[in-house]
Image: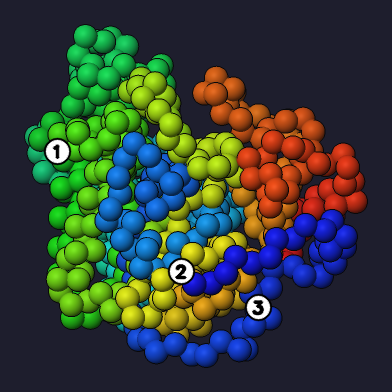
Amino acid sequence: MIKTKKLVTSIALVSALSACGQSSVTENESQIGEVNRSTTPNVVIFYIDDLGYGDLGSYGATGVETPEIDRIANNGIRFTDGHSSAATCTPSRYSLLTGEHGFRNNAKILKGDAPALIQPGKPTLASMFKKAGYTTGVVGKWHLGLGNGNVDWNADIKPGPLEIGFDYSFLLPATGDRVPTVYVENHNIVNLDKNDPITVSYKGKIGNMPTGYENPELLRVVADKQHNETIVNGVSRIGHMSGGKAAHWVDEDFAQVFSDKAIDFIRENQNKPFFLFKSYHDIHVPRLPNDRFKDKSTMGVRGQAIAQMDWMTGRIIKEIEKLGLAENTLIIFTSDNGPVLFDGYFDSAVELLGEHKPGGPFSGGKYSRLEAGTRVPTIAYWPGTIKPQVNDALVSQMDIYKSLAKLIGVEVSENEAVDSLEQLSVWLGETDQGRVDLLEESLGNVALRHNNYKFIAKSKNKPNFIKSKGIRGGYQSFDQLYDLSTDPGENKNIAKQNPDLVKQLKARTKEIVAGRY
């Protein structure tokens, strides 16, 4: 197993900060021998929604068991310092697929009818894989926008995944708590009745479908004002819609529907290299897991959704193994941002938490610049190639782009994946020397990790809901500096004691935001 790298504890060591930059070349890289691996392995990325650092058994969970994911964590790399690029979903998904920070394209949490954020011609992980002859697919939550901003949901919906490198897509268009509440396969809504056309509005009531604010007696789950509009399957959502009754999804069917589609894609492409982006709705709100998981957790529906997510993941991995593809398939498992308990629906996630710690030993969560906002479970699994280990390297999902490009022999252009670093040796477990610097983005603000230091610049841009949701978000009107090697919970601000270091880290933050590495 790779040993934990030595923690940087001396403030004086940071005087050469700008010089060290974010080099992707490690000191011991030249000593690492080439591993025996395929140059065209299948690649599957399991991208979970709102899964916190402490929400898996292998990361310390209580109140729920995750045996399927723990199996790959124990037989692959379990990263202890893996990060999404942002503490919210749309910018993180954008960063994973493009290899650049979401703020470079003003990526924010999108409405359900938002135009495509990634426009045709923009290089993506999918288009990069296609250069190497891969078949590419995406199954699950999208939330990166579709169409041109004036979507006709009853006709071909594009641009979308098929216009940016994916050969196949089966989508939940935005999120489970937003309309339209339908599946989109490739360019069209599944099971759409042309005689019952769909209309979507984020400006006001349309049609005669019931809403939470007008018909509270129809609700199975009480929601806040934002989530209290059109009711589908007994749950009110954000936004208004009308029509499309035959196409409406049933939330409790997500696990079966999405895992079936992922397995179908794998079976159809088992004889050629494929890339599958398996993007989850779980454990995002509204949490409506299938009844088969109702006894799988002491934490209510949030814990049940974690168990459901584990079942889905295990089902797909077992299919890969059944087809004899395991030793030629690299699996990466991670989450789009940190955990959140209450997020619009009163589903007792807070009341039933018990001793479980969704963020593990870290503070904050979804929407937060504190560490649990972006530090998430991160696992790499490739039987026969990756050796089982716990790895403490600082790694970012953005680096998956250039790392996998090197793996499959694709040359990345100068203006492609501009924030991604080639870190293949880290993702394959050959070294624990990862990034030096890493930005953590949240709601228009950023924080900086430099080795084990965490710098959070003062900010006037504090979201209104941060305090009301009980989130310590790191949006104070003063600079913050923490030494995570001794203070992982970010409780002791040492900024005043280290003004020179604060100055250097503030300058480094501005350099990275400006694209100067």
Q: Which residue is mark 1?
A: 292
Q: How is the image coloured?
A: rainbow
Residue 16 visible in rendering: yes
Residue 286 visible in rendering: no
Against 505, residue 476 (above or below) is above
Q: Is label 3 in contact with label 2 (beta carbons under 8 Å)?
A: no
> Image quarter for residue 176?
top left
Q: Which residue is mark 3?
A: 26
Against 245, residue 348 (above or below) is above
> Image quarter for residue 460?
top right
Q: Is residue 457 left or right of residue 438?
A: right
Kindly state the secondary structure of the residue where label 1 is placed: helix
Query: Whole-Å distance between the Cαs marked 1 and 3?
Result: 47 Å
Could you tell me the amino acid type at mark 3? Thr
Could you tell me the amino acid type at mark 2? Gln
Which residue is at the front of the view, 457 or 481?
Answer: 481
Q: Which residue is mark 2?
A: 389
